[in-house]
Amino acid sequence: MLERIDVISDVVCPWCMIGKRRLERALDVWRERHPGHSPIVAWHAFELNPDMPRTGMDRRTYTAQKFGGPERAREVYARVAAAGREEGIAFDFDRISVQPNTVQAHRLISWAGGQGLQTDVVERLFSAYFLEAQDLSRDDVLARLASESGLDGDAAAAFLAGDELAGDVAEDERMAHAIGVQGVPFFIFDQRLALSGAHPADVIVEAMEEAAAQAPA
């Protein structure tokens, strides 16, 4: 039986949000096929922009540099937005003003994992960034989003003010690069089978079933 799904992602990756929606649909299918059983989902850090300044940078400047100009950026994000609509995601790229550094967000996700709210925090961060254009480089914003996800906001603020779990985030990224991850989302099923990209739900289900079939007897 499939016990665990590790997801390597970044909170500023729109395909990662799409991949999360598709994974959720795949998990619904899995639970229908295997009543009473659902694998653990664990989220791991990956920075798409590891050299991003701590306070982030102007989003338009970032997209122009990344895609070679605003017109090309619009074309790319139009395709992403279309894929998002198929999953019920109303991406609002034009509203986003800051491209954030995501180290603090990843620390928060790691911290939430110890309190059983990791997936809730991941979802809230995705929504805050892509749907509400909130600045994820700000600790006060992250602490509030943590509170909205069910965590203690004051404890989250205190946590973010320190450097606890920074080593865990760095280790996540080191391991991702060590196994050859070049893009996210990246799914690993019971450490036996990997799937790169935001594939349709039926493809994810197939990978889950294949990994389960490979489990030792």
Image (spheres, rainbow, N blue to C red):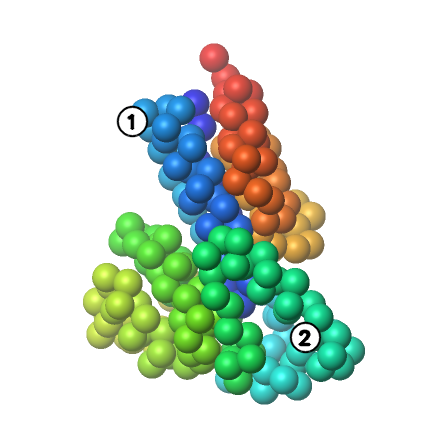
Instruction: Judge whether 32 appears above or below 183 on screen.
Output: above
Q: Which residue of the protein is positioned furthest toward the top in this rendering?
A: 217
Q: Residues within 10 Å of mark 2 (few under 14, many from 20)?
A: some
Of mark 2 and mark 1, the one earlier in the sequence is: 1
Quadrant in the rendering for residue 40: top left
Q: Which mark is residue 201?
A: none
Q: Residue at x 44, y 64 (%)?
A: 126
Quadrant in the rendering for residue 117: bottom left
Instruction: Judge whether 157 appears above or below 208 on screen.
Output: below
Residue for badge 1? 36
**Image quarter in which the N terminus is found:** top left
Q: Which residue of the protein is positioned furthest toward the right in this rendering?
A: 68
Tag 2 and tag 1, C-beta contact below 8 Å = no
In the shown orientation, is residue 22 left or right of residue 182? left
C-alpha span from label 2 to label 1: 44 Å
Query: Along the line of sight, which residue is nearer the eye, 114 or 182?
Result: 182
Residue 33 in view, yes or no: yes
Q: Residue at x 33, y 28 (%)?
A: 37
Q: Which mark is residue 74?
A: 2
Spot occupied by residue 83 in the image (x, y as percentages of width and height) = 58, 57
Q: Mark 1: which secondary structure? A: loop
2 or 1: mark nearer the eye: 2
Query: Along the line of sight, which residue is nearer the eye, 194 or 19?
Result: 19
Q: Mark 2: which secondary structure? A: helix
Instruction: Judge whether 74 appears above or below 197 on screen.
Output: below
